[in-house]
Image: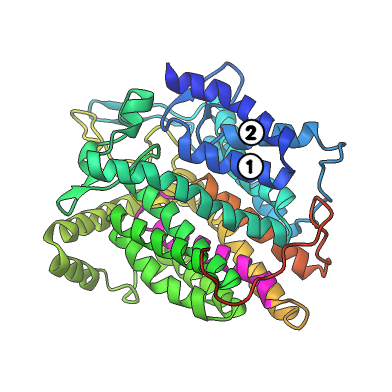
């Protein structure tokens, strides 16, 4: 009952935020609050409407509020044109489910199992789901396309995780039970929360790895703020969030933080953007690279086995699964198999799933084919490409401190793209970050001057020098 009440009441909360805050703050907190606190895995299904759930509802209600307030003084100055590249990707993302449905009208019968073909109704629903998936990207482009919006997003990531850390510490100490205590059910397999002789937090997200992923984003945001403000409080926040990454007990998040934090702290913003571009491009090319000697999978597994037998065996299992699912995806390479488990291997007798997809890239390839994979990945990677080119072209006119939040967001997005190789951690926050980068990249590329803040004041000047908390 409480999950339903939370979903039904959330539009009221979003309405209050938009009535009392400017668009940027209201949108950021609607997205971040919904992602962090709404019930995971719970949805409302109404005839003729898309599924209303944790990933979709915050963006959908935010879009409604923007539409209702578009002619009011709260309305922001329109963003720069998106450009042909992104417009084509948006259109293809919405066409991809239809093309998949057309090529998957046949049913699949294997032993005692039967999987029906994709109907027109299911295809239309897929188009709706695809639109809701990229809606945070489109809204962020519309609302957070200036430097102020980028800094506000960075600040909100830190503030949000500082609040969330209270629940994280509770779960580490008393076991992951927040979702049970509040919503009455546990959202995943409890064994996944046990690592290295203790618990790792899951709170109200789908998996402990999701908590580690957004904690890493908040840690990188805190480093950017510490670099801007140069005060003791900002440095303390960054150190505290680094500790939170440790308690998440995710080797991937810890390794990514160790590699990215020094770069974000010491390098020039343009260099950070270029490195993020290289990292993101490697993630994009992974399906091709994994078939060559450039990615030594056996050596990686051996290293993991030396560190931990359990983790090494888990990695070996994942890579074996990937290989099988990639072979399955290449049976229908262009448009994929569609949904309904058609891209998976089933036991022909029991009907149980015998191949579990972990990495989001192989899920995209299997369900949407090469076209869907390209559309999804390029909408996430493309903003960094465009930002890198625009920042280099206009390097003489761009202030380093104006590029710093965009460099931070680019690094956050690049680490997230690396993380979707082994995991399915692309969330509404991922699309929110990509849209923010894209809007600012187009602003820089088109030479549009930085607009004033919504309250008419200039952004807060950069504070220099070390200061105590007192």
Is 281 on the left or on the right of 312, as rendered? right
Occupied quadrant, residue 120: top right
What numbered label is drawn on residue 440? none
Residue corresponding to mark 2: 60
Which residues make up the magenta segment? Answer: 400-425
* Residue 267 spot, x, y in % from top left: 53, 81
Vertical placement of 346 versus 161: above or below? above
Q: CA distance from mark 2 to mark 1?
A: 8 Å
Q: Nearer the viewer, residue 467 or 256?
A: 467
* Residue 371 spot, x, y in % from top left: 55, 52
* Residue drawn at (56%, 21%) of the image: 8
Q: Are marks 2 and 1 in contact (CB under 8 Å)?
A: yes
User: Helix or strand or loop: what does disc 1 sit on?
Assistant: helix
Occupied quadrant, residue 186: top left
Q: Is residue 231 magenta?
A: no
Q: What is the total number of numbered labels drawn onto the structure image?
A: 2
What numbered label is drawn on residue 135? 1
Occupied quadrant, residue 58: top right
Label 1 environment density (alpha carbons within 10 Å; few <14, some 14–19, many ≥20): many
Is 443 on the left or on the right of 336, as rendered? right
Q: Nearer the viewer, residue 3 or 385?
A: 3
- Pick the quarter of the image with the N terminus: top left
* Residue drawn at (26%, 51%) of the image: 321
């Amino acid at each position: 009952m409480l999950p339903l009440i939370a979903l039904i009441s959330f539009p009221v909360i979003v309405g209050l935020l938009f009535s009392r805050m400017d668009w940027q703050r209201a949108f950021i907190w609607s997205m971040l609050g919904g992602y962090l606190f709404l019930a995971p895995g719970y949805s409302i299904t109404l005839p003729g409407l898309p599924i209303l759930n944790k990933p979709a509802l915050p963006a959908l209600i935010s879009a409604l509020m923007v539409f209702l307030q578009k002619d009011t003084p709260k309305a922001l100055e329109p963003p720069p044109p998106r450009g042909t590249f992104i417009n084509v990707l948006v259109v293809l993302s919405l066409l991809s489910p239809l093309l998949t449905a057309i090529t998957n009208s046949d049913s699949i019968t294997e032993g005692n199992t039967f999987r029906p073909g994709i109907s027109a109704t299911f295809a239309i629903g897929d188009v709706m789901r695809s639109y809701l998936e990229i809606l945070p990207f489109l809204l962020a482009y519309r609302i957070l396309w200036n430097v102020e919006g980028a800094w506000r997003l960075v600040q909100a990531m830190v503030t949000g995780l500082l609040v969330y850390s209270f629940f994280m510490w509770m779960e580490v100490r008393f076991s992951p039970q927040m979702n049970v205590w509040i919503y009455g059910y546990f959202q995943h397999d409890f064994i996944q929360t046990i690592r290295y002789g203790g618990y790792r937090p899951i709170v109200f997200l789908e998996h402990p790895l999701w908590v580690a992923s957004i904690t890493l984003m908040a840690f990188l945001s805190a480093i950017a703020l510490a670099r801007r403000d140069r005060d003791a409080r900002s440095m303390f926040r960054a150190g505290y969030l680094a500790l939170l990454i440790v308690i998440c007990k995710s080797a991937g998040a810890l390794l990514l933080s160790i590699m990215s934090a020094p770069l974000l702290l010491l390098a020039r913003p343009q260099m950070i953007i270029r490195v993020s571009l290289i990292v993101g491009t490697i993630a994009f090319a992974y399906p091709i690279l994994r078939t060559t000697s450039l990615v030594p999978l056996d050596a990686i597994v051996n290293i993991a086995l030396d560190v931990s037998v359990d983790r090494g065996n888990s990695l070996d299992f994942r890579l074996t699964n990937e290989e099988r699912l990639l072979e399955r995806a290449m049976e229908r390479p262009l448009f994929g198999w569609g949904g309904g488990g058609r891209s998976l291997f089933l036991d022909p007798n029991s009907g149980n799933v015998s191949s579990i997809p972990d990495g989001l890239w192989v899920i995209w390839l299997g369900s949407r084919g090469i076209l869907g994979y390209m559309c999804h990945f390029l909408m996430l990677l493309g903003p960094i490409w465009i930002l890198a080119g625009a920042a280099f072209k206009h390097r003489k006119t761009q202030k380093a401190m104006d590029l710093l939040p965009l460099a931070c967001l680019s690094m956050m997005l690049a680490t997230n793209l690396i993380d979707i190789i082994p995991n399915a951690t692309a969330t509404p926050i991922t699309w929110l970050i990509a849209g923010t980068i894209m809007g600012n990249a187009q602003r820089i590329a088109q030479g549009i001057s930085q607009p004033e803040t919504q309250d008419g004041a200039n952004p807060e000047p950069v504070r220099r020098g070390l200061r105590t908390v007192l």
